[in-house]
Image (cartoon, coloured by chain):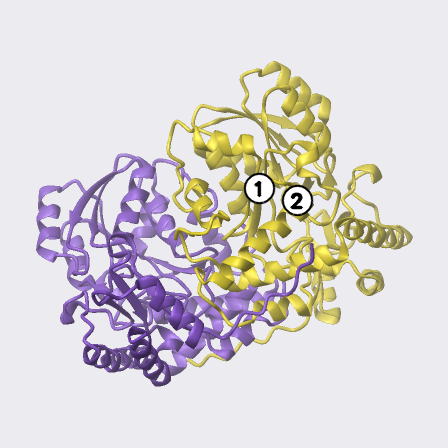
Chain colours: A yellow, B purple
């Protein structure tokens, strides 16, 4: 058997992630590998940390990029903070809230589930009732931007409630970081994780992570050992700490971190608020165009994520046929529905480097063509 | 504050990993990202699977690249196979055997430790005694190539013993895969993990993984749920299976997998046996040169890994000063000692793309200069 190099086509990625990657980030990715304990690399990691603090709007000392995808970032938050027997209030309004529950259960902790409809924001009043009804709960966990439905939740109010009821907040910001307003310190978020391949437009495989001082203290005062060696952040803290000597934990994904550094430099150069505004503007153009095509959004206007547009597949239209047509004729990827919305919805992502006028124009035009086939 | 792009120098990486990466692999890495559910990407993943089966010398259907570093690969083997209360015989002759023990303990299983001296192979007769003394043990775990000491263990004999005593074997091949003889099916290895950044000379961050049919059956018949959601391979099997529809688990690290594909194509083109022979030949040149410099190896000749040369730091020589000199004057990285050998040893890696005559010549010459400073 003979094997050839793999040469992918240039796709335009307008699904739920990965998003398009800029030439600058791809170029950074392919720079020569250096050792993960090389002083120059450690200097770069210090910058990654500062840049992540900027992106998260936090001064949290514990702010790192986990060497694995967002799902591992989620698990890192839960296994480090939550212990067996703890009560965790988990909000579920899509696939990723449900995944949080799986994480809580696998720790041997108790998940108190607050369900809100798919395609809607987490219902703040229901969460408040759950907090009142469960005064012994230690954590409130929710998804800021539900990638499976395109709904944004009111992270600021939810974190304020958590604080009021002596709960630490655990927030999924996989799809929100860089794309919409997110202020870790101002909102009092205690543990937050994201993904590299969404609005940061870096390669998939890294999970930015930040813990408040309160969260770090919880980790330091655990009764039990963290069940995962790889995700035990007390072991990782030594590697990312700014205090000179780095202790070896695992080999960092050097080249992916070059790419993350570059994507964060680009975000910093653009300015966080400008990036949020760009996502909003491109979303508005897209939404208008979709409405002109007679397409309906799943999420009510005021709860919509600009960077992830979940829409109903029009009646009589073949899901797979349209997505294949877009991919084969236009090199354009849009996302399928997930979970309850599989077969019923498409998800059009306009994240990070993808959020550009030329992509919105192409998408509208190509979709119109595909629907008329 | 202002941030610049990071432009690393071209280092020559002769430490314990990452090893040097070829221009072809770096070029594959930076190709345009495509969706992780794109049919073209799934086709490439099928090839990655076949190529990994070739590298591991196995027909195991469950052969994948885990989306995280080798330490996560280790944890994946333990958390999927071992359940709380199980007895696991773990061989410890360096840092990574010890890490296996930490993994066993965190599952709530019992580790029966067989210690062999650091810098030596695992003692097969001691392992046999432990197997006889613990007939209820379910697993035998050991490190094929101990990266912390440079010793190779007799994987073939150890796996034969495991089979004889009804244990499944769990093998760390992080540093061995591609560099020395390794035959998963012939030797009857049940669970094996490796790393992308050693003799495969790919970017760090992926962990090739293979489970025998017996191991897969153990996973399928577990009494308890795997404690890690991210590492639960029963959820991942659907994503890597060759049967058409891929189920979503997490976003695969697309670009790193391009690079792994290319590095495996290169290994296939060279031929596995040729790669083993190249590592051996370059090691012999290096070893001869080091002996000419009066440098002593930690590991006896017949137990030495060709790809990782652990040597004693000569008396009166400053560890850090020499390594810094090599890095600053020659862009040459050699590895520090780890664990018990910290401050006492250097580790010179000649792995994968690094194992070339020009690098050996440079290393000997530069080291001689550094020792005379």
Q: Nearer the viewer, residue A185 or A343?
A: A185
Residue at horizontal 68%, vertical 20%? A128
Rendered location of residue B23, percent (x, y) = 51, 79
The residue beneath circle 1 is A210
Q: Nearer the viewer, residue B179 or B287?
A: B287
**N-term-proximal mark, 2 vs 1:** 2
Q: Exactly how many numbered labels are in the figure?
A: 2
Could you tell me if residue A358 is visible in this image?
yes
Find residue A99 and report its horizontal and vertical position in percent.
Answer: 55, 39
Tell me the SS state at disc 1. Answer: strand
The picture places residue A59, in percent across and down from the top left corner, at 62, 40
Which quadrant is home to the C terminus of chain B?
Answer: bottom left
Residue at 64% in and 52% down: A51
Q: Do discs 2 and 1 belong to a common subunit?
A: yes
Residue B264 vs residue A367: left or right?
left
Which quadrant of the rendered structure holds the N terminus of chain B?
A: bottom right
**Are the two marked residues, 2 and 1, in contact with CB atoms closer than 8 angstroms?**
yes
- Pointer 1 chain: A
Image spot of residue B327 (x, y percent): 42, 70
Placement of A64 over or under B29, stated as above or below: above
In this rendering, does residue A334 appear at all?
no
Q: Quadrant of residue B372?
A: bottom left
Q: What's the chain of the residue with tag 2? A: A
Q: Residue at x 45, y 53 (%)?
A: B237
Say which residue label 2 marks: A56
Q: Residue at x 20, y 65 (%)?
A: B315
Residue A47 sits in which quadrant?
Answer: bottom right
The span from disc 2 to disc 1 (Cα, nearest Å) is 8 Å
Numbered disc 2: secondary structure:
helix
């Amino acid at each position: 058997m003979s094997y050839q190099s793999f040469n992918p086509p240039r796709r335009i990625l307008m699904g739920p992630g990965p998003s398009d990657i800029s030439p600058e980030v791809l170029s950074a990715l392919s720079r020569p590998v250096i050792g993960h304990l090389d002083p120059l690399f450690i200097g770069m990691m210090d910058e990654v940390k500062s840049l992540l603090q900027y992106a998260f709007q936090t001064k949290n000392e514990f702010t790192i990029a986990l060497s694995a995808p967002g799902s591992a970032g989620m698990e890192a938050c839960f296994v480090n903070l939550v212990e067996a027997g703890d009560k965790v209030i988990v909000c579920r309004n899509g696939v990723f809230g449900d995944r949080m529950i799986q994480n809580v259960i696998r720790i041997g902790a108790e998940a108190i589930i607050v369900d809100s409809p798919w395609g809607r924001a987490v219902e703040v009043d229901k969460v408040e009732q759950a907090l009142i009804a469960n005064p012994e709960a230690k954590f409130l966990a929710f998804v800021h931007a539900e990638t499976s439905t395109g709904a944004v939740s009111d992270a600021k109010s939810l974190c304020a409630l958590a604080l009021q009821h002596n709960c630490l907040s655990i927030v999924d910001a996989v799809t929100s970081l860089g794309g919409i307003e997110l202020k870790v310190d101002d909102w009092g978020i205690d543990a937050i994780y994201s993904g590299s391949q969404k609005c940061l437009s870096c390669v998939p495989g890294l999970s930015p992570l930040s813990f408040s001082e309160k969260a770090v203290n919880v980790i330091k005062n655990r009764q039990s050992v963290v069940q995962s060696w790889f995700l035990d952040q007390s072991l990782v803290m030594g590697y990312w700490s700014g205090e000179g000597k780095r202790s070896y934990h695992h080999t960092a994904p050097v080249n992916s971190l070059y790419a993350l550094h570059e994507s964060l430099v680009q975000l910093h150069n653009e300015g966080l608020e400008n990036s949020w505004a760009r996502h909003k503007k491109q979303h508005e153009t897209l939404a208008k165009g979709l409405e002109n095509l007679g397409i309906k959004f799943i999420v009510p206007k005021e709860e919509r994520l600009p960077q992830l547009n979940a829409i109903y597949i029009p009646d009589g239209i073949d899901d797979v046929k349209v997505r294949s047509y877009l991919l084969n004729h236009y090199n354009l990827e849009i996302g399928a529905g997930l979970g309850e919305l599989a077969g019923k919805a498409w998800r059009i992502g306009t994240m990070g480097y993808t959020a550009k006028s030329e992509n919105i124009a192409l998408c509208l035009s190509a979709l119109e063509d595909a629907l008329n086939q």
